[in-house]
């Protein structure tokens, strides 16, 4: 069973979410793959009632890195969980670049998410400069180690690592199978070294970046990948269902 994560970013009002799900849900089989839809916080409650009993899961796109209430505009773990989220995304590159979030922020968010019984999708990935200067593996290691500082091995079962090379997000550029395999191997090695061999082999690692129905096929044979993180191509319900059918 693969994990397929749809990342809607700042798309879908509550009424658009309703229309989306009415179209999408009959097209997918959530017993074959684990389907997780990460809607904006304002759409989660609408989505929660529509996905009930359908096996499709929901994720939030953000969680505040502090537990105090004086955090204007933020959402906390209790809020998104009650609104329907089982997962929350942490460390997406847009949060890192636009909102200056870093691995320390990720670390606090992960701890708060787990405390609130939310599963975490931790995004990591190198930028183009790191890729071009062969610093990719160091960058991945640093992002993972800093983000997971103080996390216990038994908590890793609630964490999925999304490998999202920044240069591949929304650009139409993709890593080759070899590059992807090497990155996933490096990610697992960090977990093996810092936790245990078993943890490194069993942690879920998914790939995200410019996936669509035409290109996803090239990665389906890679058994080191546990699933896919889809941005732009999840916005069309029929198109996303088509991608899911291929997996
Ligand atoms: C993303 O934003 O995380 C992403 C994977 O987007 P896209 O699929 O559009 O590259």
Image: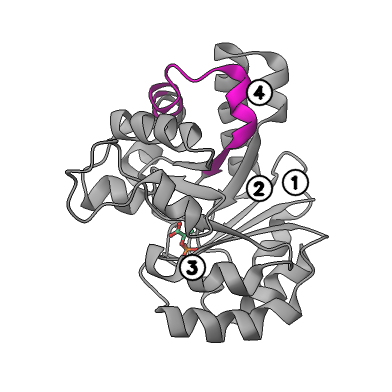
Q: Nearer the viewer, mark 1 or mark 4?
A: 4
Pick whichever, 30 or 215, lies toward us.
Answer: 30
Q: Examine the image and state in which quarter residue 119 appears.
A: top right
Q: Are marks 2 and 1 in contact (CB under 8 Å)?
A: yes
Farthest residue to the right: give it.
32
Residue visible at 47% across and 60% down? 83
**What's the distance in space between the residues labelled 2 and 1, CA to CA?**
8 Å
Secondary-structure class at tag 1: loop
From this view, report whether residue 227 is shown above or below residue 151. below
Q: Are marks 4 and 2 in contact (CB under 8 Å)?
A: no
In this view of the protein, can residue 238 be seen by the observer?
no
Q: Which residue is mark 2?
A: 177
**What's the distance in space between the residues labelled 3 and 2, CA to CA?**
38 Å
> Which label's residue is closer to the chain start, 4 or 2?
2
Relative image position of residue 56 (x, y in whole percent): 68, 63
**What's the distance in space between the residues labelled 3 and 1, CA to CA?**
35 Å
Query: In this rendering, would 3 be left or right of 141?
Result: right
Q: Examine the image and state in which quarter residue 204 appears.
A: top right
Give the magenta-colored segment's residue range. 142-162
Residue visible at 65% across and 69% down? 51
Residue 159 falls within the magenta-colored stretch:
yes
From this view, report whether residue 207 is shown above or below residue 17. above
Q: Which residue is mark 4?
A: 200
Residue visible at 56% across and 82% down? 20
* Mark 3 Cα shell of 10 Å, populated few (<14), some (14-19), many (≥20): some
């Amino acid at each position: 069973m693969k994990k397929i994560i749809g990342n809607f970013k700042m798309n879908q009002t509550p009424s658009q979410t309703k229309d989306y799900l009415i179209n999408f849900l009959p097209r997918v089989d959530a017993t074959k793959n684990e389907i997780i839809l990460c809607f904006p916080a304002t759409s989660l409650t609408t989505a929660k009632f529509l996905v009930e009993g359908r096996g499709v899961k929901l994720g939030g796109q953000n969680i505040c890195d502090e537990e105090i209430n004086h955090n204007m505009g933020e959402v906390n773990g209790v809020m998104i969980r009650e609104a329907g989220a089982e997962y929350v995304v942490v460390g997406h590159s847009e949060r890192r670049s636009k909102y200056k979030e870093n691995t320390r922020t990720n670390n606090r968010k992960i701890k708060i998410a787990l405390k609130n019984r939310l599963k975490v999708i931790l995004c990591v990935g190198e930028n183009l400069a790191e890729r071009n200067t062969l610093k990719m593996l160091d960058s991945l290691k640093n992002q993972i180690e800093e983000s997971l500082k103080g996390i216990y091995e038994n908590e890793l079962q609630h964490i999925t690592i999304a490998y999202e090379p920044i240069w591949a997000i929304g650009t139409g550029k993709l890593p080759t199978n070899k590059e992807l395999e090497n990155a996933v191997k490096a990610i697992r090695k960090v977990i093996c070294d810092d936790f245990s061999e078993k943890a490194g082999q069993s942690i879920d690692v998914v790939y995200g970046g410019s996936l669509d129905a035409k290109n996803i096929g090239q990665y389906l044979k890679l058994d080191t990948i546990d699933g896919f993180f889809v941005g732009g191509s999840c916005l069309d319900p029929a198109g996303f269902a088509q991608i899911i059918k291929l997996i």
